[in-house]
Amino acid sequence: MWSQYLEVAIGPDAEVFTKAPVLSTVGWGADVGVRSDSSWNNPEPEVVLVVNAAGAAIGATLGNDVNLRDFEGRSALLLGKAKDNNASCAFGPFVRLFDASFTIHDVRCAEIELEIEGGDGYRLEGRSSINQISRDPLELVRQTLYEHQYPDGFPLFLGTLLTPVQDRDVPGLGFTDKVGDVVRIGSSSLGRLENRVVTSKDARPWTFGIREMFRTLQGTMSARA
């Protein structure tokens, strides 16, 4: 039986989409947001490759690809609403550059741990392995760059097999995030990313865009002069 998920898992084309605009991603300790009109959503713990302008993978970090399962499940055309919302993308706690002690091989073998702790006493733990994902990390880089240029490079989420399904409130309805949840994503080689869940409308507004970045740089250079 065909499905849109099976197609991108074993078909010729990987699922590649823009998760978040430049400079909109949040880091360790920041709030992550889910839409206030979503009733079924979850974190997606992933390894994130850092790719330079030449298309070479130069390092990695951890990421939380916050996903609205109710929106995405209704239609593939709602992927943008399911994925790109205020504070819906986090990565960190640092970028580890590749060297003799940490290479793309370590990414391929990485084990990712997920821990969710709710203010209601709820607790969930899970674990996944990058080597069980159907696409090799460098194949995902290749497909992302196919007839496309990224002059500033890009961070690339590699996907996850860990989708929380443990019932939280009602038997048979599975898991969903709640405001106040603390989400921890960890790896022995990449540290631990920790964020608290809020609604996207209550998350800190995204105001520092490219224009503001250039204003800041201009002010810094003027102060030095």
Image (tube, grey):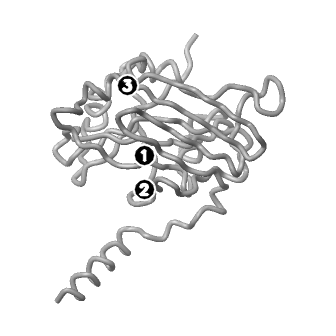
201, 105: nearer the viewer: 105
What amino acid type is highlighted by mark number 1? Thr
On screen, residue 103 above or below 181:
above
140, 77: nearer the viewer: 140
In space, the residues marked 3 and 1 are separated at their CA atoms by 16 Å
Is residue 52 rendered to the left or right of residue 110?
left
The residue that appears at 46% across and 29% down in the rendered structure is: 112
Judged from this view, the residue extending furthest toward the top is 1
Looking at the rendered structure, the secondary structure element under dot 3 is: loop
Is residue 124 rendered to the left or right of residue 162?
right
What amino acid type is highlighted by mark number 2? Pro
Is the residue under label 2 in contact with that under label 1 (CB below 8 Å)?
A: yes
Does label 3 or label 2 sit earlier along the sequence? 3
The residue that appears at 56% across and 53% down in the rendered structure is: 85
Looking at the rendered structure, the secondary structure element under dot 2 is: loop
The residue that appears at 57% across and 26% down in the rendered structure is: 126
Label 3 environment density (alpha carbons within 10 Å; few <14, some 14–19, many ≥20): few
Query: Picture coordinates of residue 167 (x, y %)?
Result: 75, 27
Query: Picture coordinates of residue 74 (x, y %)?
Result: 67, 34
Residue with the mark numbered 2: 21
Label disc, if present, on residue 18 of the rendered structure = 1
What amino acid type is highlighted by mark number 3? Asp
Where, quadrant-wise, is the C terminus in this rendering? bottom left
Is residue 216 rendered to the left or right of residue 72?
left
User: In the rendered image, which quarter is residue 220 located in?
Assistant: bottom left
Looking at the rendered structure, the secondary structure element under dot 1 is: loop
The residue that appears at 37% across and 26% down in the rendered structure is: 110
Label 2 environment density (alpha carbons within 10 Å; few <14, some 14–19, many ≥20): few
In space, the residues marked 3 and 2 are separated at their CA atoms by 23 Å
Q: How many marks?
A: 3
Where, quadrant-wise, is the N terminus in this rendering? top right
Residue with the mark numbered 3: 13
